[in-house]
Image (cartoon, rainbow, N blue to C red):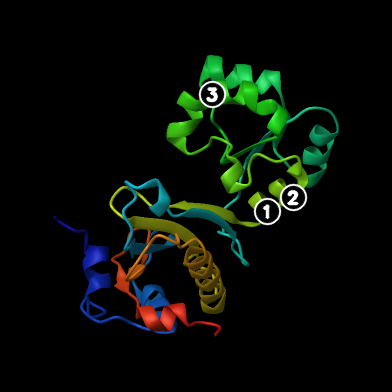
Amino acid sequence: MKRGKRYNQGIAGFDKMVCYEPLKAFELLKQMPRAKFDETVEVGLNLGVDPRHADQMVRGTVVLPHGTGRKVTVLVFAKGEAEKQAEEAGADYVGADEYVQKISEEGWTEFDVAIATPDMMSKVGRLGKILGPRGLMPNPKSGTVTFDVAKAVREAKAGRIEFRVDRTGNLHAPIGKISFGTQQLLDNLQSFLDAVVRAKPSTVKGQYIKSITLSTTMGPGVRLDKQAALSMGK
């Protein structure tokens, strides 16, 4: 694959075969040539699970202590008191039938997170073909189907991310922006890895986390020393 000049300059600054401690890895990312925008820092994990089996699915949510660095637009499907609570918590769009109709008829998806009260799911469920493929469908397992909409809105705005292993056993998530301070990125990485460890299925035997890699939106991946990464804060 032909790579761009910036990518090649970045990969020349470290050894692809070496696994670096988290602090050094973030320093390497920050030393790489920058794109013209504030790139997202992403973490990628390869897990020793077989997602084809339901009892080995890894998914969950985590609120990053320093957020993701991007503005999150939140839609809440709610009525009555819950509608008022969502508005007070800072939701960008709050309503019921009008938004169900807008999505179903216009295909409108100009939001990043959708939250719904349980009593609204009989209507929101009809939007699965539109919201599902985009990862926008409210789900009890991710905390986006709840009567406590105020808490859900605040967490979404604060930087809650949802993670889910793909069919090949890989898991990717954003943990901040390259403009973040190194300690902020370390804190976010630690919180994310702790959440993944807690989400380990009881049926998984042997090595759970096989490898961890850090990268920016346009840059090459830097391999992490797995033991050092998983022992942060301990």
Tell me whether the residue at label 1 lies in contact with that at label 2, contact meaning CB atoms closer than 8 angstroms.
yes
Q: Where is mark 3, residue-wise?
A: 127
Cα–Cα span, label 1 and label 3: 23 Å
SS for callout 3 = helix
Identify the residue shown where x is 58% and y is 47%: 142
Identify the residue shown where x is 28% and y is 52%: 168
Please, what is the three-letter code of the amino acid marked with disc 3?
Leu
Cα–Cα span, label 2 and label 3: 24 Å
Which numbered disc, 2 or 3, marks the residue that appears first in the sequence?
Answer: 3
| Quadrant in which the N terminus appears | bottom left
Which numbered disc, 1 or 3, marks the residue that appears first in the sequence?
Answer: 3
SS for callout 1 = helix
Identify the residue shown where x is 26% and y is 80%: 14
Direction left: furthest residue: 1
| Quadrant in which the C terminus appears | bottom right
Closest to the observer: 228 or 113? 228
Q: Where is mark 2, residue-wise?
A: 151
Q: Where is mark 1, residue-wise?
A: 155
Number of numbered callouts drawn: 3
Tell me whether the residue at label 2 lies in contact with that at label 3, contact meaning CB atoms closer than 8 angstroms.
no
Please, what is the three-letter code of the amino acid marked with disc 2?
Lys
Residue 167 position in % (x across, y down):
31, 47
Task: Say left or right for 144 vs 221.
Answer: right
Residue 213 position in % (x across, y down):
34, 69
Please, what is the three-letter code of the amino acid marked with disc 1?
Glu
